[in-house]
Amino acid sequence: MPLILLTTSPRVAPGLLGHRAWQVLRSGRVLTGTPDHPQLPYLAEAGIEVEVVAPDPARLVREAAGAEIVWLAAQEGDEDLMRAVGRAALAADEPPLIEMVPGSYDLPGARVLDLVAVMDRLRVQCPWDAKQTHESLVPYLLEEAYEVVETVEDGDYPALREELGDVLLQVAFHARVAKERADGFDIDDVAEGIVAKLVRRHPHVFGEVTVEGADEVNANWEAIKAAERAEKGRESALDGVPLGQPALTLAAALQRRADRIGAPAGLPEDAASALGRRLFELVRQARADGLDPEAELRAAARAYAALVRSWEQRA
């Protein structure tokens, strides 16, 4: 007879089980080692009796030899128990057929729920996390973003996974801090906002607009952004450009916005130093050549760093 191991995801609401899971739950004796398993009330409501027993691999294998046994695994997976059951089955004279049935599956993005839960707990139980503010977290957000840039430039894609996780933590952290304000928001509000923005700015995907290519997509995007600024009462095309970003990136962003509305391109002599004007024009030249001035200077700086290290080794 089979020993069926039924697993469920803690990221799916209890009671939401697949058809195969309900079949096996009604086909044999159901056991669990988790007295507070969140599925129990829903199984009881469905008329399915579940016995709570001490986890005993040898006993499970022995009893499955005479009757079908369904083991409702803890939501953490009962991995140690499952390995012990496998060893006990190998040692049995007549090992039962062991089948694993997933009762519920995670959807893409489900692990973000774990991050939200962990962040909630840290905010309450960790003294350092509890005292952080939006202002105190800003340096970490900038640092993590630059570390993502570094891994991409290095082509270190295994490290990119970790660095993106660090950035995602900052998003979750800020959302958790904001949740405590009277006028605050939470991570769902953050997600809702960006989803709405993406849908609104992609009418060629979510609406009836037809586009010829990427250039037309970009033109539509900018037109929609301009309409959004007008709706919010913003008067300048430069509204929304963060002035705290690195100077080369800032200059490029301001030039792009100004070009779209036909604003004057040059700087008057009394507006900046001669060096400042030269740097500003170099940014314009880089843009005309289809280059990112920030990335170009960073690449030059990284090359110089490698040159200095090589010189140090020779010296």
Image (spheres, rainbow, N blue to C red):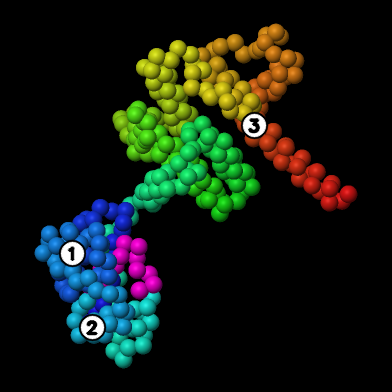
SS category of the residue bearing label 1: helix
Which numbered disc, 2 or 3, marks the residue closer to the eye?
Answer: 2
- Other-residue count near label 2 (Cα within 10 Å), few / some / many at <14 / 14–19 / ≥20: some
Q: CA distance from mark 2 to mark 1?
A: 21 Å
Give the label, 2 or 1, closer to the camera.
Answer: 2
Q: Which range of residues does the magenta coloring cover?
A: 70-82
Q: Position of residue 18 (x, y in %)?
A: 22, 60
Identify residue for label 1.
22
Residue type at tag 2: Glu
The residue to which callout 3 is attached is 294
Spatial distance from mark 1 to mark 3, Cα to Cα? Answer: 58 Å
Residue at 17% x, 58% y: name it: 42
Residue 167: in sight, yes or no?
Answer: yes
Q: Amino acid at mark 1?
A: Trp
Q: Residue at x 62, y 13 (%)?
A: 265
> Which of the two discs, 2 and 1, labels the residue nearer the N terminus?
1
Residue named by callout 2? 63
Name the image quarter holding the N terminus.
Answer: bottom left
